[in-house]
Image (spheres, rainbow, N blue to C red):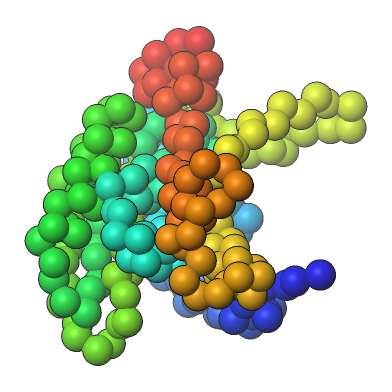
Amino acid sequence: MTDYKKAGVDIKIGDKASKIAYSFARSTFFSRRGMIGEPVTDEGSFAGMLDMGDFYIVQGDDGVGTKMEVAERIGKFDTLGYDLLAMVADDAICLGAETISITNTLDTNKVDPDVIHDLMKGLAKACIEQKVVIPGGEIAEVGKSVNSNVWNATAVGVLEKDKTITGNDIKPGDKIIALQEKGFRSNGFSLVRYVLEKEFDVNVYNKPSPFGKSWGEMILKPSVIYSSALLELLGRFGEER
């Protein structure tokens, strides 16, 4: 069985690094104690919550990972914005939060206006569909520090306290409804690329697949963003359901 370590990703080391980072992040929480914006601690949460009195602000960070490398191989960037928004907005909705804004950071070895155009066109389209705004961002040309584009985002959401989803009330016998994804989103792409390149070669992405498209087009299928659909069930901020 192929595992992440063979694909260059050590999950155990990654978990250790995350725990180190979280311990230092948590060491700052006391500085807002009793003040607006005091963190609500939940180590297993998909995003961070800040107590704003009558409601929570929810913040989360993520990126498209090495899905960007596939886009670079076939020169197609216009759907990655859906993946970027999905990674952060769908983390926020796991808590019941409505994402209201997203900022993004692109680290690149060389700025290419055409690539920027396609990336941001896709992100803007996804945001308009989800009623999310892009109030800011950063493009950093960092030369040889990176071999490809690295695209990450921070989302900000709002959440009424009585709508918070914690999972604490789940009990044996509860029904689980699973939402099937038709693609890979931006998860596990180091492993996806490893498997394809091992089975074929590094040029596999432009070759035809059995599914009517090239392998690159097939695995670049944009993420389904579930946030707005779930908000229809839960109610947007200030709406009753």
Residue farthest left in this picture? 113
Which x, y percent locates residue 220? 45, 51
Residue 48 shows in the view: no
Residue at 66% x, 70% y is 199
Residue at 35% x, 50% y is 80
Describe residue 230's horizontal placement relative to residue 101 as left or right.
right
Seen in the picture, residue 143 relative to 44 is either above or below; the reply is below
Which x, y percent locates residue 176? 76, 29
Residue 178 shows in the view: yes
Residue at 25% x, 56% y is 104
Which x, y percent locates residue 219? 51, 52
Task: Name which quarter of the figure residue 15 lies in.
Answer: bottom right
Q: Quadrant of the N terminus?
A: bottom right
Residue farthest right in this picture? 173
Which x, y percent locates residue 154? 33, 54
Seen in the picture, residue 95 relative to 104 is either above or below; the reply is above
Residue farthest top in this picture? 241
Describe residue 62's horizontal placement relative to residue 124 as left or right.
right
Describe residue 165's horizontal placement relative to residue 37 as left or right.
right
Task: Name which quarter of the figure residue 94 lies in.
Answer: top right
Residue at 58% x, 38% y is 182
Q: Nearer the viewer, residue 28 or 188?
A: 188
Describe residue 50's horizontal placement relative to residue 116 as left or right.
right
Q: Nearer the viewer, residue 60 or 32?
A: 60
Q: Nearer the viewer, residue 160 or 96?
A: 96
- Count of marks, rendered view: 0
Seen in the picture, residue 180 relative to 154 is either above or below; the reply is above
